[in-house]
Amino acid sequence: MRFFASLCDKKNLIVYKDIMQIFTELNKNPNLSLALGYFDGVHLGHQAVIKGAVEYAHKNSKKSAVITFKDHPCCYLWGVCPKYILTRENRRKHIENLGVDYLYEIDFESICNLNADEYLQNIIIKHFTPSAIFTGWNHTFGHNKRGNAEYLHQHATNYEYYEIEPKSFNNEIISSTTIRELLTKGKIEQANSMLGYKFSITGTVIEGNKIGRTIGFKTANIKYPSELIDLPFGVYDVWANNKKAIANFGVRPTVDGHQAVLEVHILNFDEDIYGQEITIEFNRMLRPEKKFQSLEELKKQIKSDIKSITVR
């Protein structure tokens, strides 16, 4: 996996090592193989679209690009942003890891009033003169969503157009909406199967009330990102920086907690990692959060929870 490099000095350009470049404004960049979409979650369906553009580029000695938006279109259309599956930083990482050369994150507000023809001609054709365009089967664009796969097929005179059919899991079409619903219900394993990777949260370890260490279970605490889809309060089987761990997300009612926090107990680990960044990958939900009558009862339950993940 490639990791983030430092910010580049050029305005509106971020460089990930020497692989993917990110632009936050349009520029002239011709003969590209394009993947169009918002790609929240970069799930298996999204991956098929992006991989199609990347593979076409490789076969035809072109460069590939993803054209997307900084924020979800709903933020501008309805004034309410949805809860995301990935933070913007992690969406970039997932797209980069698919081998994309350029990522364009444009401001939806700047193009939201364009009709389908204006968007295709004045944005896509004018700036990229694409060799190929890839979208999902349900992709729409332009005012009132008049642009769609059929429209791109009809106007494919100077570019090749590829409509990627939907991907399914257990006879259900994979979509960001479905994945959000699964995550909010704690159905982590099903969501992960649709994502093609484990739902994760990355954050900096902060100081907590240190009650965990008094009962023999030292925890690393991180703030749950406010922009991400909310998991149910509960206990989870997780990996923490590739180490087996157990996590509690909630308000810790046994110790009169009030603010929701993600607490992670890493098995067979006792290092001081305050201020360090860790990534928590979720495997499955074990049980809902509950209030215990005493710390001793809580300790007994934690031992039982740990046993359930180590014997599996």
Image (cartoon, rainbow, N blue to C red):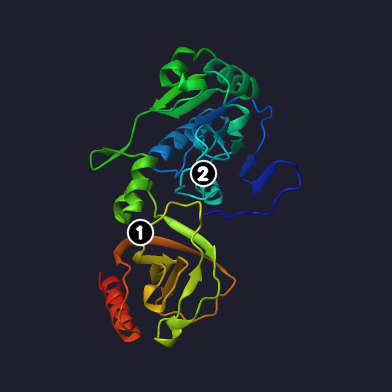
Q: Amino acid at mark 1?
A: Pro
Q: Position of residue 270 (x, y in %)?
A: 48, 82
Labels 1, 2: front one: 1
Circle count? 2
Q: Amino acid at mark 2?
A: Ile
* Residue at 35%, 52% in the rendered image: 183
Is residue 204 shown above or below 227? below
Instruction: Write down the quadrant of residue 124 in the picture.
Output: top right
Q: Position of residue 232 (x, y in %)?
A: 35, 59
| Residue 206: mark in rendering | none
Q: Position of residue 197 (x, y in %)?
A: 39, 52
Is residue 310 shown above or below 52? below
* Residue at 32%, 84% in the rendered image: 294
Viewport quadrant of the C terminus: bottom left
The residue that disc 2 covers is 95
The residue that disc 1 covers is 232
